[in-house]
Amino acid sequence: MSESPLLMIPGPVEVSPAVAAAMASPPPSHLAPELVEAFGSALENMRRVWRAAADDQPFVLAGGGTAAMEMAAANLVSEGDRVLVVGTGYFSDRMAIILGRYGAQVLAVEAPVGDAPDGERVRQALGLYGDVRVLFATHVDTSTGVRIDPAPLARLARERGILSVFDGVCATGGETFEMAEWGADVYLSASQKALSLPAGLALQVVSRRALEGRRRRAGAPPLYFDWEVWRSIMEAYEERRGRYFSTPATNLVLALDVGLREILEEGIEERVAKHQRASVALRAGWRELGLAPVPVRPDLAAHTLSALNLPEGVDKSLVAAIGRLGVSVAGGLHPEIADRYFRVGHMGYSVTRPDWLARVVETVGEALVEKGVEVDPQAARRAVEGLFP
Ligand SMILES: *Cc1c(COP(=O)(O)O)cnc(C)c1O
């Protein structure tokens, strides 16, 4: 078997040896004592990683991040409801599409690619439209590497009696999120990004207020996504009783328990701080290679991935060239600029590996040299190592 490339795309990402071991264990029954214990402890630990209140409800379902988005929409929105989407790129657009399918009247506040609408514009939009039921925003839009500050939006929603939903798929575990302190209502995520697990789990923590919101929805949501159906299952596991509705992804639940424990052993604040230090070091490396970020201001740049404009004269074949050198990075995703930039994920377990971060920058530099760009990959490597030893 040839050595697999270092996986530095914005999800799935590299996982720790202990997480990989949990995935490789013989598949347990959904009622096995070991699984019930892991499920219960994972639910408790989700509240800690999400910085949620004791009465916020965690949900763990087989599915991707899109399933988590769908679940939030399905429980809160029905025909004719007005909702506001904060536009940041491909994933906020996807949220709007999902909401449209539930019959919502979707109002959007948009910004140019690489930028995000500020809190004041969202406040004005809410004032203008009136009667908005739910505010949706993407914490890190993986298509552009743009990160918003959810705090003022969550507070604004609270002030106005609106529910707030944040897509943390590319952020949870790698960016600051204070669910309880900010009064956010739903923080949804998936396993394969900053939480550093294999793909396959849709995750979210939901406030009491949002669970009430589900009851005010006209009609019941699709069965598989119904918070009310799943809530009793989650409560049972948290009380260390197995209970069946639809078979959980048992190995992934074992991996979730291991992965969340690892984050909490380090401390969520320390894990987030590590993402911040790693991204600052990488930015120095990218600067050394002459690569400019897609986010238009440094305060908008995510700590979990870099979206980088391709230099003059270099096309998207750079991504494959980097791959041939043993590091897997990703192409563009935002349709407006898809062929003009590329993306590097640096989240989860990889930020505990300074050697990997230095290698990524050096490898991107080598691929640029192959393409005829005059840069110094070694200098870029040293720039990263100097800041993230
Ligand atoms: C990856 C991603 C999603 C979609 O997750 P899937 O598991 O691919 O369905 C949604 N939102 C954001 C911000 C993402 O990064």
Image (cartoon, rainbow, N blue to C red):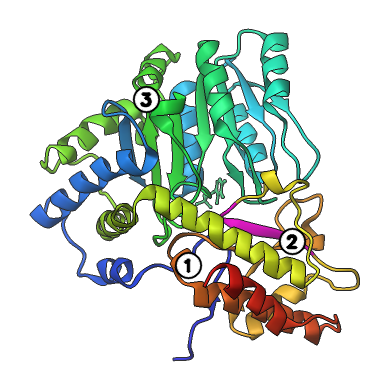
Magenta region, main secondary structure: strand
Q: Residues within 10 Å of mark 3 (few under 14, many from 20)?
A: many
Residue 187 percent location from the top left of the image: 45, 35
Q: Residue at x 63, y 34 (%)?
A: 97
Residue 113 percent location from the top left of the image: 78, 44
Look at the image and give the residue range highlighted in magenta.
303-309
Q: Which residue is mark 3?
A: 207
Compared to 226, does 217 lie above or below? above
Q: Quadrant of residue 209?
A: top left
> Of marks 3 and 1, which one's residue comes earlier in the chain?
3
Q: Are marks 1 and 2 in contact (CB under 8 Å)?
A: no
Q: Which residue is mark 2?
A: 308
The residues tagged by marks 3 and 1 sit, at their Cα atoms, a distance apart of 31 Å
Q: Nearer the viewer, residue 274 or 346?
A: 274
Q: Which residue is mark 1?
A: 350
Q: Label for residue 295?
A: none
Q: Is mark 1 within 8 Å of ligand 1?
A: no
**Placement of the N terminus among the 4 image quadrants:** bottom left
Q: Quadrant of residue 100?
A: top right
The residues tagged by marks 2 and 3 sit, at their Cα atoms, a distance apart of 36 Å
> Of marks 2 and 3, which one's residue comes earlier in the chain?
3
Q: Are marks 3 and 1 in contact (CB under 8 Å)?
A: no
Does residue 266 appear to the left or right of 2 in the view shown?
left
Indicate the amino acid at tag 2: Leu
Q: Nearer the viewer, residue 217 or 289?
A: 289
